[in-house]
Image (cartoon, helix red, strand yellow):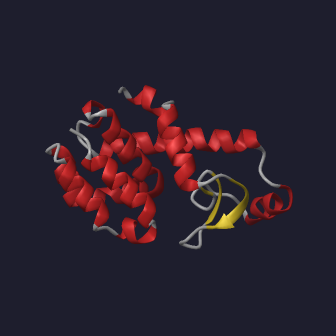
């Protein structure tokens, strides 16, 4: 699908929301980073401690969570377009899986040489194996297993 459609794809949005969870108060993620909403990295987006402390007391409005989510999905789609040559022409399912990963990893995907090579060759089984043998899989084993199974099923 084209990249604008992908940013608004309900299946993609649903799977990321399930994988990330939805939190209306800030929390420290598995890496110790202040996060809120749907996997929104507050530190990377310049949130001051005073803002974080305020949100700990009052919570974050749903409108702001939705705004962050749209921005973060847009950033993940843009990242995939830059990291994976020909991304716009990939099967829809491959696009969704890679954007899901980019939502979490962003430009760390540049370092995934094996995954990038497999994806460039439309070797979806090899790409699935790359996902399973990664640090990403040790940090989020259920998510990685689910994404790898979906990647392996692409024809």
**Place of residue 15 in the rendered image (x, y in percent of width and height, measured from the top left):** 50, 45
Nearer the observer, 23 or 148 = 148
Q: Is residue 113 above or below residue 63?
A: below
Say left or right for 118 vs 137: left
Residue at 56 percent across and 55 percent down: it is: 20
Nearer the observer, 150 or 27 = 150
Q: Is residue 41 above or below residue 150?
A: below
Where's the C terminus, which quadrant?
top left
Instruction: Specify the quadrant of the image occupied by residue 45.
Output: bottom right
Nearer the observer, 40 or 136 = 136
Residue at 35 percent across and 44 percent down: it is: 80
Residue at 52 percent across and 32 percent down: it is: 10
**Place of residue 89 in the rendered image (x, y in percent of width and height, measured from the top left):** 26, 31
The answer to whether residue 144 of the structure is visible from this angle is yes
**Place of residue 81 in the rendered image (x, y in percent of width and height, measured from the top left):** 33, 39
Instruction: Specify the quadrant of the image occupied by residue 2.
Output: top left
**Place of residue 50 in the rendered image (x, y in percent of width and height, measured from the top left):** 79, 63
The answer to whether residue 81 of the structure is visible from this angle is no
Where's the N terminus, which quadrant?
top left
Q: Which residue is situated farthest in the left direction here?
A: 121
Residue at 39 percent across and 30 percent down: it is: 3
Q: Is residue 45 above or below residue 140?
A: above
Q: Which residue is situated farthest in the right direction here?
A: 58
Number of marks in the rendered image? 0
Instruction: Specify the quadrant of the image occupied by residue 21.
Output: bottom right
Q: Is residue 51 above or below residue 9?
A: below
């Amino acid at each position: 699908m084209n990249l604008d459609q992908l940013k608004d794809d309900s299946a993609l949005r649903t799977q990321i929301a399930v994988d990330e969870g939805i939190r209306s108060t800030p929390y420290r993620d598995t890496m110790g980073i202040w996060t809120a909403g749907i996997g929104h990295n507050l530190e990377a987006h310049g949130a001051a401690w005073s803002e974080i402390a305020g949100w700990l007391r009052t919570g974050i409005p749903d409108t702001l969570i939705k705004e962050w989510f749209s921005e973060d999905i847009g950033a993940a789609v843009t990242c995939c377009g830059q990291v994976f040559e020909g991304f716009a022409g990939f099967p829809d399912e491959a696009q969704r899986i890679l954007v899901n990963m980019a939502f979490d990893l962003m430009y760390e995907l540049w370092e995934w040489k094996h995954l990038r090579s497999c994806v460039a060759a439309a070797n979806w089984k090899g790409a699935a194996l790359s996902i399973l043998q990664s640090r990403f899989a040790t940090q989020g084993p259920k998510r990685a297993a689910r994404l790898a199974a979906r990647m392996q099923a692409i024809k």
